């Protein structure tokens, strides 16, 4: 298993994100207003913009470079844009956040 | 979702389906939707029937949604079924063939019927209206078989029909009751020009003429007039007007006058029944153009979706004639009258005519013939009720003549541009791509074009061009810019309403604004959150706590993000003046952090580009130790104060422009604004600091200081307006700061001073700053007060550990 504990929920700001550096590249971990946590590859499907630096709203993030909107749950760009930032499984237990470094299958 | 309420739409036309589409955008799953349409197809773009008739478009081009579209959204479509009965007690509608549907909410969008003059013979084969696809097919059939056509009605629709039939090879005569064409849209002169050029194209006119009978046995053979004369013809098109189609509503006992009477929420007298489109009568007015109907659709959808906050307040409309090669624009009151003034421009040789009607220093109406590129601009000024006193002198010559040297030339060429002409320089989008997206994806609004093509979605300088392409491609008067612009999709409130509520209702947090102004979600969006954060910060200095998650990344990280995710660092160089010690400190920092590029900016300072986010706080710490503060090159904030050498060195310098620039920068740095803000201070009118394209430009003269405002050297160049002349440096500081505060308190977020000054007028600014000493002093005080909270160096704070998590990864996982 490749679950790693990455920190506590409160390390991630509401409607914000933090970055986890990994040998396979950066992973952005987002927290929404309703305390859900999502993890995506920190690279926009458009031109690789760092999604962790975007504005989080509802369950989406808007890329800081050219404003594509990405669904946090699926990693999919909101139509009419097309593309997907890879997703990583995350879970929160007793206020601690764990991340699985194996990305989810694209169509799962 | 088994118990969804049932929504039924009667009338599968432009207003009704627009309402459904608006509803699906904001509440896709709320209703179980059934649509009845008397015509046997999905909905189509009715206004394009004219180009179809003229052979410039095909029917396929104009369909909007096909059967699959309805099916994919779970909408039941009963096409070819005319509803004949509404049972309001059982809440059920029934069509002629017995098909029925129950409703919880009902929308009536039955449009209009063409008015057929009830003269003898009006029901003979060969007499048609001009309203739907069937009419157009009848006309096209006639054009194949016959040679002569008469169009009764010299209005917009009649002329488009006549032009189309002529293009199909028919010999066409337009018959009109009055001696002037399009009397409801044009004055006499413009109508004369129009008639002349239509005659040159081959149309014939018989006017004034009153039709008394349609003659013929089996089929039409001619038209007889009240004066006894007769015209031979094989086809008669009646285009004399439309009547709202209210028979169904009347039969159901709904209150109707000329149309079905609705309130500001588009609700009829029955609280379960809405009416939109040409069949609806709102505040006594009926509308026969799509732009207002689309506004109605949006409001109606808002109520159906249970947001319950939108209001339709009526529309100001404008018209254009869709005859290729003829440019004609008309809006508002174009005939003058009591208390109105007229401005007229005519160039007979080029066939250009332009008339503006002014009332109380505002545009009340416009007619343009020949060159209509400025039509949308006049229309905007008219709807915004902009006071035109300041631009009166050049108003008639168009937007290009009022200090805007932007893209005027390109607009003139727009219609003739080749498909591969680049329209959006930022995103590399060509004209052909935009046209293709509009036609294949059936786009109607600027917003949709932005989403699908990215054109005009970055710097926005090509917005005018894209709007033009949209108008040319979809035709008619698509509402490219609604008269009332909500701040964003989360609310119906405008920027001004939001700002007024924040101050008036003492709203001090973002959730309080969301609640008070009925935001439709609780996290806002990337458009409203940064705006609200600024508005709150500006209204409640010292009280409101900045919400960094509502800042764009540049402001959150206090550096400009670069395309590779690194940042740039631009320390403040006061007034552009530096010294060897400062330069040495910057050089050392650049070496220590291995900065790949060091560049002089266009704002007289040094840019250290390519710094990783983690290095920022330490680097800022080193710069702070050497006495530097942030240059806010990343912020909607005071940027640079550009100066020239001035009297200290220059043989022409009249005052110490360098020293004054430094004082201005010391006073104003750190201030957050609606958009970025730049000063220029030149030592003499030679203007080496380019003060005439700055937000505030100071030009030193022998006797004092000239203050200029509202300049912009960016996307759209605008030279400053002269504000006033003052005698002392202290006055320069006071007037400049008062101007900044007025801008901070009143402009819309992301509106620079140039468009703001154009919107409110220079005279307004002068009244507040120059003529009203008390207001100026109060503004200056409020500015200085807010500066006590703003002039804390954000870099130093972060070097000391504030927001440390922003700059550090949460975790580094080793291989
Ligand atoms: C660095 C600099 C170019 C340079 O290498 O010289 C620059 C760089 C950028 N400019 Fe600029 N502008 C720079 C001087 C200018 C000037 C010249 C001046 O200030 O005298 C102008 C025209 C003058 C004016 O503002 O009226 C200018 C007009 C713009 C505009 C158009 C603004 C407008 O209102 O039309 C934008 C786009 C925007 O702000 O939305 C822009 C946006 C940008 C951005 C922020 C684009 C972005 O969003 O990333 C660039 C950031 C690069 C970076 O990371 O540093 N930049 N930019 C200059 C920094 C000046 C400074 O010291 O702070
Ligand atoms: C040739 C032409 C050119 C035009 N050009 C322009 C232009 O350039 N710019 C502009 O702004 N406007 C233009 N218009 C006007 C514009 O098309 C109308 O204002 C607009 O279509 C009205 O929308 P609506 O939904 O109210 O009515 P419609 O689009 O007419 O839709 C009403 C629909 O309801 C159906 N219906 C009616 N009664 C029933 C019933 N009982 N049961 C079921 N279905 C029913 C009708 O068959 C029709 O399909 C033009 C119109 C025409 C005909
Ligand atoms: S620095 Fe300014 S002009 Fe240069 S590419 Fe960036 S935004 Fe465009
Ligand atoms: S890189 Fe994300 S929108 Fe362009």
Image (spheres, grey):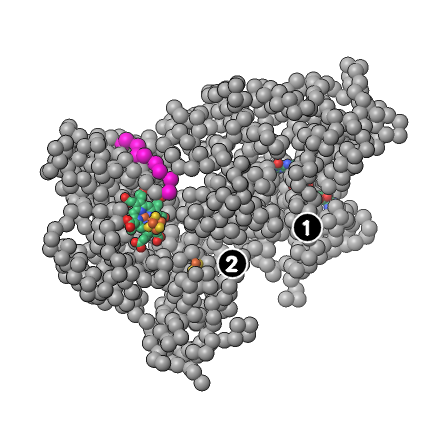
Q: Residue at x 47, y 44 (%)?
A: B423
Say which residue appears at 34% left-offset and 80% top-offset: B814
Ligand 2's quadrant is top right
Q: Is residue B512 visible?
A: no
Of residues A102 and B392, the one nearer the viewer is: A102
Residue B176 locus on image (x, y percent): 70, 22
**Residue located beneath label 2 in the image:** A81
Q: How many numbered circles are shown?
A: 2
Residue lying at the far right of the rendered structure: B217
- Mark 2 Cα-neighbour bin, 10 Å: few <14, some 14–19, many ≥20: some
- Classify the position of the N terminus of chain B by image quarter: bottom right
Q: Residue A62 location, x and y as percent?
A: 43, 60
Q: Considering depth in this image, is B651 or B84 the residue closer to the camera?
A: B651
Q: Residue at x 26, y 61 (%)?
A: B596
Circle 1 sits on which residue? B9
Q: Main secondary structure of the magenta part?
A: loop
**Residue at mark 2 shares a chain with residue at mark 1:** no
Quadrant housing the C terminus of chain B: bottom left
Whether residue B717 appears in magenta in the rendering, the answer is: yes
Residue B481 magenta-drawn?
Answer: no
Left or right: B213 as drawn, with respect to B263: right
Residue span colored magenta: B715-723
From where the camera sits, is residue B477 visible? yes
Does B80 appear above or below B207? below
Mark 2 beta carbon near ligand 4 (under 8 Å): yes
Q: Chain of mark 1?
A: B
**Mark 1: is the Cβ under 8 angstroms from ligand 2?**
no
Q: Quadrant of residue B551?
A: bottom left
């Amino acid at each position: 298993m490749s679950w790693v504990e990455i920190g506590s929920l409160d390390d991630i700001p509401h409607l914000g994100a933090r970055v986890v550096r990994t040998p396979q590249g950066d992973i952005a971990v987002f927290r929404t207003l309703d305390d859900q946590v999502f993890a995506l590859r920190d690279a926009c499907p458009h031109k690789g913009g760092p999604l962790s630096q975007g504005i989080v709203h509802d369950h989406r993030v808007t890329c800081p470079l050219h404003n594509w909107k990405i669904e946090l749950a699926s990693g999919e760009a909101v139509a009419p844009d097309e593309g997907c930032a890879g997703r990583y499984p995350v879970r929160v237990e007793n206020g601690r956040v764990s991340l699985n470094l194996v990305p989810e299958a694209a169509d799962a | 979702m088994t118990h969804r309420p049932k929504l039924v739409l009667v009338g599968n036309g432009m207003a009704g389906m627009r309402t459904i589409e608006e509803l699906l955008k904001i509440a896709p799953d709320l209703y179980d939707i059934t649509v009845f349409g008397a015509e046997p197809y999905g909905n189509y773009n009715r206004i394009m029937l004219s180009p179809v008739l003229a052979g410039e478009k095909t029917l396929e081009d104009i369909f909007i949604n096909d059967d699959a579209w309805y099916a994919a959204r779970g909408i039941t479509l009963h096409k070819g079924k005319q509803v004949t009965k509404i049972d309001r007690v059982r809440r059920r509608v029934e069509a002629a063939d017995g098909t029925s549907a129950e409703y919880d909410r009902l929308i009536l969008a039955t449009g209009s019927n063409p008015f057929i003059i009830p003269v003898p013979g009006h029901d003979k084969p060969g007499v048609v209206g001009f309203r739907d696809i069937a009419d157009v097919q009848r006309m096209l059939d006639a054009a194949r078989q016959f040679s002569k056509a008469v169009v009764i009605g010299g209005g917009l629709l009649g002329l488009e029909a006549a032009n189309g039939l002529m293009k199909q090879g028919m010999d066409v005569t337009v018959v009109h009751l009055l001696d002037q064409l399009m009397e409801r849209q044009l004055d006499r002169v413009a109508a004369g020009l129009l008639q002349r050029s239509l005659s040159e194209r081959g149309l014939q006119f018989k006017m004034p003429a009153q039709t008394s009978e349609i003659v013929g046995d089996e089929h039409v053979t001619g038209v007889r007039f009240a004066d006894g004369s007769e015209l031979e013809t094989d086809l008669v098109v009646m285009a004399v007007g439309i009547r709202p189609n209210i028979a169904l509503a009347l039969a159901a006992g709904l209150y109707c006058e000329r149309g079905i009477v609705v309130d500001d929420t588009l609700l009829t007298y029955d609280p379960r029944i809405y009416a939109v489109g040409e069949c609806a009568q709102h505040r006594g007015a009926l509308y026969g153009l799509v732009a207002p109907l689309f506004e109605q659709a949006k409001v109606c959808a808002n109520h159906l979706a249970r947001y319950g906050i939108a209001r339709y307040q009526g529309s100001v409309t404008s018209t254009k004639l869709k005859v290729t090669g003829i440019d004609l624009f008309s809006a508002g009151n174009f005939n003058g009258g009591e208390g109105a003034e007229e401005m007229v421009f005519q160039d007979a040789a080029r066939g250009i005519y332009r008339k503006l009607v002014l009332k109380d220093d505002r545009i009340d109406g416009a007619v343009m013939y020949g060159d209509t590129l400025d039509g949308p601009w006049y229309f905007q000024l008219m709807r915004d009720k902009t006071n035109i006193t300041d631009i009166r002198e050049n108003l008639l010559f168009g937007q290009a003549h009022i200090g805007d040297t932007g893209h005027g030339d390109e607009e003139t060429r727009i219609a003739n541009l080749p498909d591969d002409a680049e329209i959006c320089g930022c995103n590399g989008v060509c004209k052909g791509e935009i046209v293709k997206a509009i036609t294949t994806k059936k786009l109607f609004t600027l917003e949709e074009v932005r989403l699908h093509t990215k054109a005009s979605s970055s710097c926005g300088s090509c917005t005018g061009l894209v709007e033009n392409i949209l108008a040319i491609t979809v035709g008619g008067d698509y509402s490219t810019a609604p008269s009332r612009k909500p701040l964003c999709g989360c609310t119906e409130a405008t920027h001004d309403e939001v700002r007024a509520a924040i101050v008036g209702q003492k709203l001090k947090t973002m959730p309080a604004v969301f609640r008070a102004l009925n935001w439709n979600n609780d996290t806002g969006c990337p458009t409203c959150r940064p705006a609200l954060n600024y508005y709150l910060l500006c209204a409640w200095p010292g009280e409101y706590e900045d919400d960094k998650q509502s800042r764009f990344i540049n402001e959150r990280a206090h550096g400009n993000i670069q395309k590779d995710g690194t940042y740039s660092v631009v320390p403040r160089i006061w007034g552009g003046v530096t010294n060897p010690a400062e330069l040495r400190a910057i050089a050392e920092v650049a070496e220590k952090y291995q900065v790949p590029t060091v560049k002089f900016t266009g704002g007289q300072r040094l840019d250290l580009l390519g710094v990783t986010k983690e290095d920022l706080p330490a680097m800022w710490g080193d710069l702070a130790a050497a006495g530097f503060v942030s240059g806010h090159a990343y912020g909607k904030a005071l940027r640079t104060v550009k100066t020239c050498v001035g009297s200290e060195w220059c043989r022409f310098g009249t005052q110490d422009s360098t020293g004054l620039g430094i004082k201005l920068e010391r006073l104003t740095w750190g201030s957050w604004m609606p958009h970025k803000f730049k000063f220029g201070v030149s030592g003499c009118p030679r203007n080496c600091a380019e003060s005439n394209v700055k937000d505030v430009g100071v030009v030193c003269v022998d006797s004092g200081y000239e203050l200029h405002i509202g300049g912009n050297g960016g996307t759209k160049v605008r030279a400053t307006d002269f504000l006033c002349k003052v005698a002392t440096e202290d006055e320069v500081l006071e007037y400049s700061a008062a101007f900044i505060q007025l801008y901070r308190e009143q402009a819309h977020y992301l509106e620079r001073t140039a468009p703001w000054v154009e919107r409110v007028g220079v005279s307004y600014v002068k009244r507040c700053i120059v003529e009203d000493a008390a207001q100026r002093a109060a503004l200056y005080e409020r500015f200085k007060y807010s500066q006590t909270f703003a002039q804390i160096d954000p870099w130093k704070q972060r070097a000391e550990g504030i927001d440390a998590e922003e700059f550090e990864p949460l975790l580094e996982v080793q291989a």
